Image: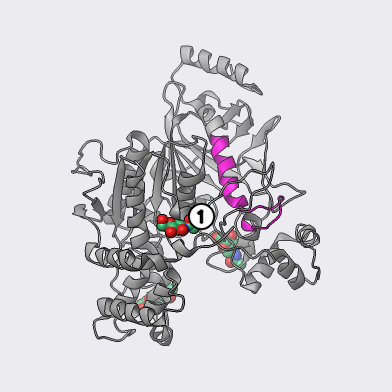
Amino acid sequence: MFYGVQATNQVVFYLLIISVQQSSQSSITETLLDSESARPIVHTPSGSFRGLEAQDGDYSMFLGIPYARVDPDNVFGPSIPIGFEGTFEAVEDTVRCPQVEEYNNTIMGKLDCLHINIFVPNSASIDNYLPVMIHIHGGRFQFGCAARDVHGPRFIVRHDVILITVNYRVGPYGFFCLNTPKVPGNQGLKDQVQALRWIKENIRYFGGDDSKITLGGNSAGSMSVDLLQHFLQEPLYNRVILQSGVLLTNGVIQHPDPDAPLKLSKQLNHITNDINDALSFLSRVDPHELIAATRDSGMIVGPCVENQFENVDNYITKYPTNMSSVRNVDVLIGFNNDEFFDKTITMQKEDFESRDFVSENLEDNYDFKNESHLSDEIKDIVRKFYYGDNPNSADNRRPGMNIIADFFMYNPVLRTVKKYLDSGVENMYFYMFSYLGDRSFSKYKCNTSHIKGGAAHGDELGYLFDVSYLKELLHDEDMLIVDRMTEFWTNFAKYGNPTPKPSKLIPLQWPRVSQDKLPYLEINTELRLGSRPMHERMSFLDLLYKHIGRYHKEHLWTGQ
Ligand SMILES: *[C@@H]1O[C@H](CO)[C@@H](O)[C@H](O)[C@H]1NC(C)=O
Ligand SMILES: *[C@@H]1O[C@H](CO)[C@@H](O)[C@H](O)[C@H]1NC(C)=O
Ligand SMILES: *[C@@H]1O[C@H](CO)[C@@H](O)[C@H](O)[C@H]1NC(C)=O
């Protein structure tokens, strides 16, 4: 009876839902199978979307749904919400926002990119609304995308949750941060908020439970989630998953170069001193040219603290590392046990040995001003802690690997756990992923399977998503890790608890974190409950922080 129905307003649709409730228990997408195309179709107040049936599982795909559009008159400014009259063919997920592709260094993408992909299990029905998991991709706010070839949904949707992946603007289009009301900064993050609003308003029409929305991300995606935890006022999600990325990592918040548009214009042979002239020039150049100019200039753009203007929506208004209050939701947080393995193992011997990891990391995090005596003393202590009396040698890279990972990831993540607890978060679970198998990113990227190491940055993703370029599952062990990871993650999305009851697959209960105990689950072929990960190194860094925290850059930050 719904075939061809165009529900353009909510009232009509509620009537449809009520009549379905009375008549059947069949899948939403089945019920709404389009008679002509035999393809799933969903009607929402924001438009109708005709998707595809998946070939590798019992689910439907709605690909490339535009949740907003880039303002053609202000491509560096906030995006505009959109709706559709008629039916949108939701079949294309390969569009990404303009960027340099991560692995092959080619420039790709277009500005019509503010899309989400929605993957709906056939078990979703009017009588069976399913929990929703949203995943925000990483990529240093410079690259990345929501496409299926890196976020294949089949392992997750078989657990009866809806998965949504999100594109947002990256690089200059997402993160120009200027002292002008038209381009106040953080456009890419504001895109994410637009996507969350769209999902909250529309997901029930796809069979999603809008009271069980879990927002997750990895790396810069996880930093984005941490930012939302600090700054988002609207209740657009119920749980969060933070995978290897937090704001306490120094350098997430950039100190913007207000002349960035002038410099990039000049590089593209348009010389001007007028910022508005530069912006209007840059908004007309081919996005690939601007991305190339940004890359060639070495300019880094990213999240920033915004200047405030009258009648302009702000997002990040304060320096977040010092903010003590975050949203009290269920939290799943953790990291991999060898985050910088791939980065350090692939360095040439000479490069590796010429680096001074102690000075670099101390200076990244601390500013000793003119107290060079103190700086030398502290460096000496840190060096002895990590190296003993040994030199930094390519034959033993372990100390260097640990220093980077500790300063950049492990200590900031663990301090974030404390911050969340202090802020009143009660239901929080901590993991450490340590499995290394054939679906690990680092192996694929570095071809280092012959060198002993742990799980590097991003390695967990191949066990949550069906990444097309990783080998097909070769052995049972990889599949076991996929089964466990997706069971933990989807249980958390359903119940706010990754192990609601012991099973054959997961014969244990994962305790939550508290003020005095920091239990964690080590995820590997053996599941192991540990307590306070890397506690010796972390206690050393905590002591250091306690002692010289006044020199820590987060305390010295002087911005607008
Ligand atoms: C680079 O990678 C992207 C994403 O996988 C692909 O679509 C594109 O064709 C590749 N380009 C080249 C030149 O290999
Ligand atoms: C990966 O490393 C192995 C062993 O060092 C080598 O034999 C092989 O050719 C490498 N593969 C690629 C694609 O570089
Ligand atoms: C951050 O907090 C410290 C300690 O409370 C304070 O001294 C510092 O001024 C704060 N920094 C900013 C940027 O708010």
Q: Secondary structure at mark 1?
A: loop
What segment is highlighted magenta in the picture? 175-199
| Above or below 346: residue 213 | above
x, y percentage for residue 415? 34, 56
Residue 198, magenta (yes or no): yes
Q: Is residue 347 above or below residue 204?
A: below
Q: Does mark 1's beta carbon lie closer than 8 Å to ligand 3?
A: yes
Residue hosting label 1? 319
Q: Quadrant of the C terminus?
A: bottom right
Check the picture and name the quadrant holding the N terminus: top right
Is residue 217 something one can see in this rendering?
A: yes
Name the amino acid, label 1.
Answer: Tyr
Q: Position of residue 142 (x, y in %)?
A: 57, 61
527 or 3, nearer to the observer:
527
Is 100 displayed left or right of 151 in the figure?
right
For the residue pair 433 and 277, the one nearer the viewer reads as 277
Write down which quadrant ligand 3 falls in: bottom left
Q: Residue at x 29, y 41 (%)?
A: 498
Count residues near mark 1 (Cα–Cα under 10 Å), then give few for <14, some for 14-19, many for 20+. Answer: some
Q: How many marks?
A: 1
Is residue 245 visible in the rendered structure shown here? no
Q: In the image, residue 367 lies at what x, y percent?
A: 45, 72
Q: Is residue 462 above or below residue 36?
A: below
Is 385 left, or right, of 255 in this rendering? left
Question: Could you tell me residue 313's position as x and y percent?
Answer: 64, 43
Q: Is residue 371 magenta?
A: no
Q: What colour scheme has been applied to the protein in the rendered image?
A: one colour
